[in-house]
Image (cartoon, helix red, strand yellow):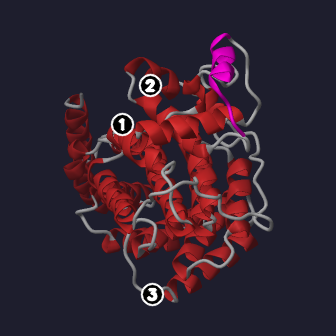
Amino acid sequence: MRYDRTSVAHWLAGSRPRKKVPGLVAQALSQRSGRLITVEETGLAPDLPPLAPLGMAWTSDVDPRNRLAAVCRAETDLTRRAVLRRAPYETHPLKLPSWRDSSPSAPPCGEGGRSEAEVSILQNMGLVFASLTDVNGGGHARTALAAYLADDAAPILLAPAGAQWHEQHLLGCAHLTHLLANMTDDAGHHGLAQAYYRIALALAHRAGDRSAYATTLRALSTQALRLGHLQYAADLACAAVGSAGQVTADTRAFLLVQRALVHAHTGRRSQAHTDLKAAEREHGQAPASAGPFASYPRAGLDYQRGETLYALGHADAALTAFRDAEAHRSPTQRRPYALAQARLAEVLARSGHLEEACRHWHVFLDHYPHLSSVHVERAADTLHQAARSFPRQPHARIVSDRARELSGRRP
């Protein structure tokens, strides 16, 4: 395929090239300029509505690299960011591709190449932002990750590379996009978070990594369940388990325990118990590992076990699980530690253990000022409402007063 100045003149005059040409032009301009140029930015693509980067996040004929760059770049603009944050959450079924006929996407052709060092940088950035989320919540440094993806990570994907490094870069960007989705959800922008999850899903599929793909489906299920879309959450959890293939025992436990939870919430008690036992068994066989996408901590499994048992009506067993989750979680992981304290306190109060509940609520409040998280804010609201329901109890009044004071200091 070859085009000369005459063709370019026709394009500038308003004619549209053939369907595949805008993508090739974007790739050529990206390689020449050293930064990612999206198809939309070439001016050769059909006009797209303002929220097309979100609604088309999983469309098969849209390159997820371009979609990632477009949405992340919009996030760095204050006006466009406000529009993105108002994106609605969608519950229509995803048209998921088959893995039977899938293969990793071909890397861009050309000389030169990407290196192992660049893969390592992506992995290190994943560790940095995962740690920031655990320590300060998703509301801190979220747009910094979006800017990094737009300016540094996404352009790497268009550089020439061998198949091995191309797949590893796709996977690294999928992981970072998944983390950005987590942070965005924790900041309360649920429609935008869903779009990022879907982009991460597409990148994982192009990388040929079933583990990352299934893990992202699981995250979408978690989000749907939290927002009250029970059947949608169940469908996503089942799709996550079904698409996983041969994954590690940690990952298998991670997927199964989410399916157990949605089974519990949708009245499938027998299936919930079966999946919960299977998750426990898989986790017990998992070797020690580290990293946000390489391991599933015992505290996470205990917490999910508590939620599942509580949804099934086993309050005493759930309390034991929540206590285990709190005991296994390090205080240095401030966000999950605080949420574990708050949930344990809530269940304790409902079970008649008010004094013990207040002790855990105070620990939650110790960490509360350091966290920017919608989920932490909701836990604080639940705390305040629960404590106020015991007006004659001194311990509850002290907790309620402290929560009100700390909440009043929030920006």
> What is the crowding at mark 2: few (fewer than 14 residues within 10 Å), some, or many (at least 20)?
some
- Lateral position of residue 283 relative to residue 406, left or right: right
Q: Quadrant of the C terminus?
A: top left
Q: Residue at x 75, y 39 (%)?
A: 92
Q: CA distance from mark 3 to mark 2?
A: 42 Å
Pick whichever, 117 or 149, lies toward us: 117
Do the CB atoms of the residues marked 1 and 3 lie less than 8 Å apart?
no
- Lateral position of residue 311 relative to residue 69, left or right: right
- Residue that label 3 marks: 287
The mark that comes first in sequence, 2 or 1, is 2
Quadrant of residue 218 in the image? bottom right
Q: Which residues are magenta?
A: 1-13
The mark that comes first in sequence, 1 or 3, is 1
Pick whichever, 365 or 291, lies toward us: 291
Residue 354 visible in the snapshot? no
Do the CB atoms of the residues marked 3 and 2 lie less than 8 Å apart?
no
Q: Residue furthest top?
A: 13
Q: CA distance from mark 1 to mark 3?
A: 35 Å
- Residue that label 1 marks: 143
Q: Which residue type carries mark 3?
A: Pro
Q: Residue at x 46, y 45 (%)?
A: 154
- Lateral position of residue 162 relative to residue 351, left or right: right
Report x, y in % for residue 376.
Answer: 36, 45
Element type where label 2 sits in the image: helix
Tally of numbered discs: 3
Pick whichever, 343 or 230, lies toward us: 230
Report x, y in % for residue 378.
Answer: 41, 41
- Residue that label 2 marks: 81
Q: CA distance from mark 2 to mark 1?
A: 10 Å
Element type where label 3 sits in the image: loop
Report x, y in % for residue 366.
Answer: 19, 51
